[in-house]
Amino acid sequence: MSQSLDTTRWTIILQAADPAAPGSQQALEALCRKYWQPLYAYVRASGKNHEDAQDITQGYFQRLIEKNLPGRVSPDQGRFRAYLLATLRNHMLAWHRDATTQKRGGTDSVHLSIDDDPTLTDALSISPEALYDQRWAQTMVKNALDRLADQQAELGHRDRFALMRSLLLDSEHGEAAQRELITHHGMSEGSIRTAISRLRAQFRQIIREDVSKLVENPAEIDDEIAHLLRALKD
């Protein structure tokens, strides 16, 4: 599939799930890598240790690809966030029924490196669903920042944006970054404020674009963004 995963929406996800489509399996594998963290966090918060959670998450991704799960659904079944969680729950039930937890057969093409997240220790006190939504929101923010970083790099501002990235979400604790921008990038405090304001507008637009690609109805965009914001505050 020639389209970037940043343009993924339900229709493109279904195209990627078509085994006859060129590059479909690689596209689904990349999709799995992009969204493994909130799914893995959900499994950990459900009471599984790192080893079992890794086995479940790896197995889920492999099943997602091998069984062509996205190709079996219709976009009107809901938002992609909810779809992944629902199919993960079904996979966990199947995992529990498999007492030996033997490795799944078929293709052996999914090799994701999953390290236990040290930040999960304190987060495991909240419900699995709340943690899933929190990590999903964090993933969306990271993906948007990465896209913005790529855009800035194309403009020749890679190093400058690396400093500004920390200021986008927390301008009150970026004194060191501001000093670096003034000293080594020739920016004034006013120009930094202007640049940050513009970058935040671009960041919000990217978030909106990304959310629009994971819901079927445009009317759901604002509600989904509000849901992500609530999840980040929890």
Image (tube, grey):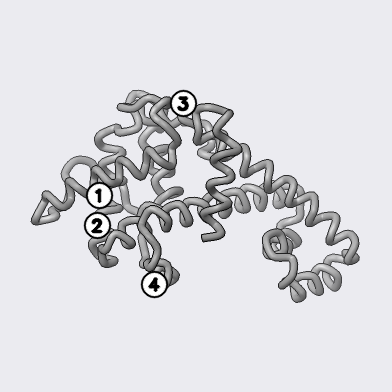
SS under mark 1:
helix
Residue shown at 73%/62% (left/top)? 164
Q: Of callouts 1 and 4, which one flags the residue occurring earlier in the amino acid sequence?
A: 1
Frontmost of labels 3 and 4 is 4
Q: Say if residue 22 shows up in the picture.
A: no
Query: In 3D space, how far apart are the residues under numbered discs 3 and 4 (Cα atoms)?
Result: 37 Å
Q: Determine which residue is flagged by label 4.
A: 121
| Amino acid type for the residue under numbered disc 2 | Asp
Query: Which residue in the protein does label 1 denote?
Result: 59
Q: Position of residue 114 (x, y in %)?
A: 36, 60
Q: Type of residue at label 3?
A: Thr
User: What residue appears at the point 29 percent right and 32 percent down from the top-left corner?
Assistant: 68
Residue 204 placement (x, y as % from top left): 68, 46
How crowded pointer 1 is (Cα within 10 Å; few <14, some 14-19, many 20+) is rated as many
Q: Nearer the viewer, mark 1 or mark 4?
A: 4
* Mark positioned earlier in the residue sequence (2 or 4): 2
* Label 2 element class: helix
Which callout, 2 or 4, points to the residue nearer the camera? 4
Which of pointers 3 and 2 lies earlier in the amino acid sequence? 3
Give the residue number, with chain letter if any, for mark 3: 11
Neighbours of disc 3 within 10 Å: few (<14), some (14-19), many (20+): some
State the residue position of label 2: 55
Q: Mark 1 and mark 2 in contact (Cβ < 8 Å)?
A: yes
